[in-house]
Image (cartoon, helix red, strand yellow):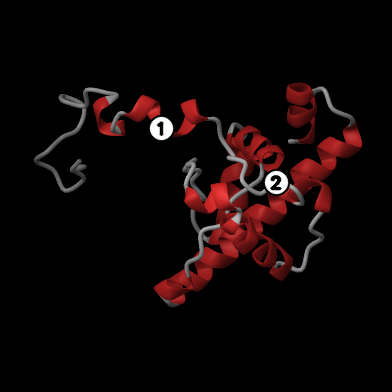
Amino acid sequence: MVDDFRNATHAGHDYCTRAVGQNLVFLKAVGDIRRAERQDPRNYVRIVPTPPVDQAWHLSLQRTEVYVPMSVTFAESFIHHRPVMDDGIRSGAALARTIPRLRATGYYVDPEFWDGEAGTSCCPPECNDQGGRDWRSLVDWSGFLPLDTPLAIRL
């Protein structure tokens, strides 16, 4: 994953190693939250990555042979990525919720990747709003989704 990040960013090896490490700390925190949520849904807290951590996350998602077992180890299920921009991100509240959750993992939280990032989206607008369209309108699923089987997907 470090090589993928380095190839994508052309940054130095040390920076790339630290960015990927912070992505792992973030995913561990997400996993901890999901495990706690299974015990009591009120334990859910939405946390967010910063732009450099999100970039490492995007690249790790492309390595499913590594990402899937890592997700299962951290969260006992797949950790999905759902990029959004909302008031919590704009105001810095989402990042303020995130930092304590990162620290609770017991791993080092590198300030270079978390400090001063409040109010920035982890994804650009074209990644999170589909131009204002509902995601279901982006693809015609008719003919692909069986509606009369136990595995039917209802939209």
Residue 9 is situated, as x and y percent measured from the top left of the image, at 77, 25
Which residue was labeled with disc 1?
Answer: 129
Q: Provide the secondary structure element on which disc 1 rests.
A: loop
Residue lying farthest bottom? Answer: 40
Q: Name the residue under label 2.
A: 117
Up the image or down, 37 lies above or below 16; here it is: below
Amino acid type, mark 2: Glu
Q: Distance between the residues labelled 1 and 2?
A: 21 Å
Q: In this view, does 52 lie above or below 79?
A: above
Q: Residue at x 65, y 65 (%)?
A: 101
Residue 53: quadrant of the picture: top right
Q: Where is residue 69 in the image (x, y as percent from the top left)?
A: 59, 49
- Residue 94 in the figure: left or right of residue 56: left
Q: Where is residue 119 in the image (x, y as percent from the top left)?
A: 61, 46
Q: Which residue is drawn at 61% across and 43% down?
A: 67
- Of 41 and 154, the residue lying toward us: 41
Q: Is residue 113 left or right of residue 57?
A: right
Q: Which quarter of the figure is the C terminus placed in?
A: top left
Q: Decide which of 117, 104 is in the foreground and name it.
A: 117
